[in-house]
Image (cartoon, rainbow, N blue to C red):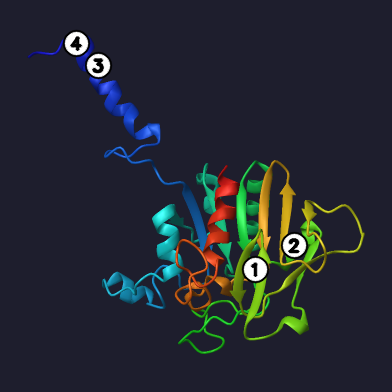
């Protein structure tokens, strides 16, 4: 049967509209966007760039696989790319040292309504085959202090918590990690550039309103290590040993909303 010009136009409009409707071609809901910058070897293990180009890239770690099942992940090499990212939550997990222009770009992106979950670790215990001082090794300590100071808070390492295994309870979820840090409000010395709530201090979590945007901060990145949450006696419906990834997903979903 021949289609009329109007019917053909309607069919074409439907095809053009479909990808924009939040559904994939098979009718499944489109996964929320997640922007990722990290020095942790989440996506490729510790495979080198040459190995990746040769198709020998390492397998993604369990935390990345867990997030990829739930979100459409876009890895960022530089925060200057945030100008092109009009949607999605930004996950900064122990990122590399950021340049001053990148810190400005992040602050401005948040002020314009961006949302970010920041994992900043003062004493990372992530295992690595690379020697100390190697740029490919995950960053040992967070270098986001200039940004935190700008927002009126600081990240510290409580010496009484510098232990191999530490438990935390956040939002009713039980976490397990190693050498977590804490956030403190800086003494009054001017007007901070963000409104940060750190709760009873020292606090494992801080929530900062930055202009029209919001940043949720956790004082640890080791909690993404599979050994702290995967396997063992199940505490929840996912069968996880601890609820580390449930917290990460919950906070990302709140920021997405």
Q: Which mark is residue 120?
A: 1
Q: Which residue is mark 4?
A: 5
Side of 168 where 195 appears, left or right:
right
Up the image or down, 128 lies above or below 89; here it is: below
Q: Which residue is mark 2?
A: 148
- Residues at badges 3 and 4 in contact (C-beta under 8 Å)? yes
> As rendered, which of 1 and 151 lies closer to the eye?
1
What x and y, as percent, mark residue 163?
67, 86
Q: Please, what secondary structure does the residue beneath circle 4 have?
A: helix
Depth check, mark 1 against mark 2: the one in front is 1
Q: Which residue is mark 3?
A: 9
What x and y, as percent, mark residue 49?
37, 73
Q: In whole angstroms, how far apart are the C-alphas of marks 4 and 2? A: 60 Å
First in sequence: mark 1 vs mark 3:
3
> As rendered, which of 93 and 111 lies closer to the eye?
93
- Residues at badges 4 and 2 in contact (C-beta under 8 Å)? no
Up the image or down, 156 lies above or below 171; here it is: below
Q: Residue at x 74, y 78 (%)?
A: 157
Q: Residue at x 77, y 57 (%)?
A: 151
Side of 94 where 159 appears, left or right:
right
> As rendered, which of 173 and 226 lies closer to the eye?
173
Q: Residue at x 46, y 77 (%)?
A: 232
First in sequence: mark 4 vs mark 1:
4
């Amino acid at each position: 049967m021949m289609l009329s010009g109007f019917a053909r136009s309607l069919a074409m409009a439907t095809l053009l509209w479909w990808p924009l409707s939040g559904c994939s071609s098979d009718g499944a809901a489109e996964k929320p966007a997640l922007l990722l910058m990290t020095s942790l070897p989440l996506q490729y293990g510790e495979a080198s760039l040459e190995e990746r180009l040769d198709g020998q890239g390492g397998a993604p770690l369990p935390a990345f696989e867990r997030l990829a099942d739930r979100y459409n992940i876009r890895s960022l090499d530089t925060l200057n790319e945030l100008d092109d990212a009009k949607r999605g939550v930004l996950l900064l997990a122990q990122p590399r040292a950021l340049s001053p222009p990148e810190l400005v770009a992040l602050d401005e992106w948040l002020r314009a309504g961006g949302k970010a979950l920041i994992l900043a670790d003062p004493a990372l215990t992530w295992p690595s085959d690379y020697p100390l001082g190697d740029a490919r090794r995950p960053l040992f300590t967070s270098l986001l202090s200039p940004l935190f100071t700008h927002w009126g808070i600081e990240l510290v390492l409580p010496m009484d918590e510098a232990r191999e295994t530490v438990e935390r309870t956040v939002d009713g979820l039980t976490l397990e990690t190693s050498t977590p840090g804490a956030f403190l409000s800086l003494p009054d010395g001017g007007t901070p550039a963000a409104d940060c709530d750190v709760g009873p201090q020292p606090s494992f979590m801080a929530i900062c309103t930055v202009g029209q945007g919001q940043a949720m901060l956790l004082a640890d990145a080791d909690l993404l290590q599979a050994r702290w949450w995967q396997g063992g006696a199940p505490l929840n419906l996912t069968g996880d040993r601890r609820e580390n990834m449930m917290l990460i997903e919950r906070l990302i979903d709140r920021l997405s909303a």
